[in-house]
Structure formats: C-alpha cells, structure tokens
Amino acid sequence: AQSVTQLGSHVSVSEGALVLLRCNYSSSVPPYLFWYVQYPNQGLQLLLKYTSAATLVKGINGFEAEFKKSETSFHLTKPSAHMSDAAEYFCAVTLGFGNEKLTFGTGTRLTIIP
Amino acid sequence: EAGVTQSPTHLIKTRGQQATLRCSPISGHTSVYWYQQALGLGLQFLLWYDEGEERNRGNFPPRFSGRQFPNYSSELNVNALELEDSALYLCASSLEGQGRIQYFGAGTRLSVL
C-alpha cells in the first residue's frame, strides 16, 4: 500500500522568496514519486518525476525536488517565487509493477504575495 | 500534438439520472485512468483501463463503470446519480512502463442537482 502526506494545506510566500512545499510518503516498495500542479479550472500538469535515477530532480518552471529515503520525503522547492506560481500543488506516488494508480496527497494551495 | 481531451466540459444532471463522460487519450497511449476530485475529498483513483481491459478499480460503488474502446478512448458511466457524485472527473493517459507518467485532461465537471 502507499500513501502521501502533504504538510500545510495553504502556503503563502512573498514574490521572490523561496518556495518549499512538503511531501512525505509511505510505500512498501521503492516508489515512483510525482509533483503535479493544478491551475484554477484546469487539469493536472506534471512538474517533475522521481524514478530513482537521481535523488535531486529538476522539473519545469524552475521547480526541483529532492528524494530523501531516510526521511521518506520528496519536498518541492523553487528558489524564487513568481506570481504565476500561484496554484494548487499535489504530490503523488505509484508503486509500478502493474499497480499504476496514482495516490495523491491532499494538495497545497500556494499563494504569492506581491 | 493533441493532449488528453475530455467531453463534455460541464454536465448537469438530476439525482437518479445517468451520466456519461468521455475521454480521448494522447495518440499512442494505451492506458486510460479516471480520477474523481470532489470538494473536501481530494483526488481519488476510480478506474484504470489498458488495452481494452479494466486493470484496477478504486473504492467506488459498482454504479461507477466504464469501458475502453479499440481506439483507446474511454467512457466513464455513473448510474443512479447521487448528490455526492458532484465533482471534477479527470481522465489521464499514459504509455506502458514502470512508474509511467500520467498526462491529464482538463476534466468534466459533473453537477448533480
């Protein structure tokens, strides 16, 4: 079984400040981990994916995430927030090996303060 | 290249009716997934179809069903609609492979009155 916990349902940062969105996972086998972003009235867009090739994963729009097995974490960061980053962010996990469903966290709504 | 397309964008039904939602995957993708995004419940996995077969099903009652056609497009049917079925229904598609990336459509917003 797998699960994802996102700490902080709402996060506010000032424009130009560091963005840190937290994600912890639980998995019985090495997981595949994803971050998706959802803008209002839209579907989900993939930001990045972890597949065990490298612990630091770079994604689109300047986002990156670091896989830490010892902490079972996959936190999302961006050095400098932009107004266009305001959206809802979802961390997700899948086990692969024929079990390809995504299990999502509850999401974090990111607000950017001008 | 066209992404995942879903229709209709919005659907309004009354309690007890049936709803049919449609999804066309990205060209070349053989797997289709359905998720429900209901207010307060987050994103929940509904169904996974691959090569025309149902591969996995989430914790939803049998009145949620679907199918995948030979061209890999898919339908989600919801029978005997209840008020709590009101949600955004998202379809995703993927290629084969471990830890495959799922690409999402914009969704169908179902409102049950």
Image (tube, rainbow, N blue to C red):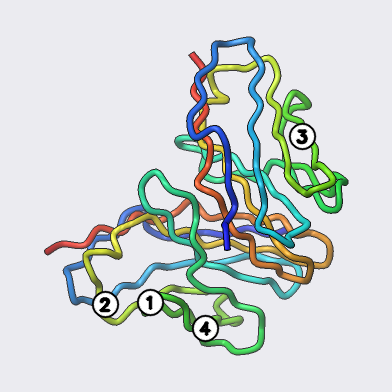
* Residue B12 point in image, percent of width and height: 50, 19
- Mark 2 → mark 4, Cα distance in angstroms: 17 Å
- Which mark is nearer the camera, 2 or 4? 4
User: Does mark 4 fall on the same chain as mark 1?
Assistant: yes
* Residue A77 point in image, percent of width and height: 38, 76
* Residue that numbered label 1 is attached to: A77
- Mark 1 → mark 2, Cα distance in angstroms: 7 Å
Q: Do callouts 1 and 3 mark residues in contact (Cβ within 8 Å)?
A: no
Classify 10 Å Cα crowding around label 4: few (below 14), some (14-19), many (20 and above). some
Q: Badge 4 sits on which subunit?
A: A
| Label located before the other in sequence (1 or 2) | 2
| Label located before the other in sequence (2 or 4) | 2
Residue A30 is left or right of residue B82, and the answer is right
Name which residue type carries label 2. Answer: Leu
Residue visible at 72% across and 50% down in the picture: B32
- Mark 1 → mark 3, Cα distance in angstroms: 38 Å
- Mark 4 → mark 3, Cα distance in angstroms: 35 Å
Q: Which mark is residue A68?
A: none
Q: Do callouts 1 and 2 mark residues in contact (Cβ within 8 Å)?
A: yes
* Residue that numbered label 2 is attached to: A18
Residue B45 is left or right of residue B87, and the answer is right
* Residue A71 point in image, percent of width and height: 55, 78
Q: Quadrant of the C terminus of chain A?
A: bottom left
* Residue that numbered label 3 is attached to: B66
| Label located before the other in sequence (1 or 4) | 4
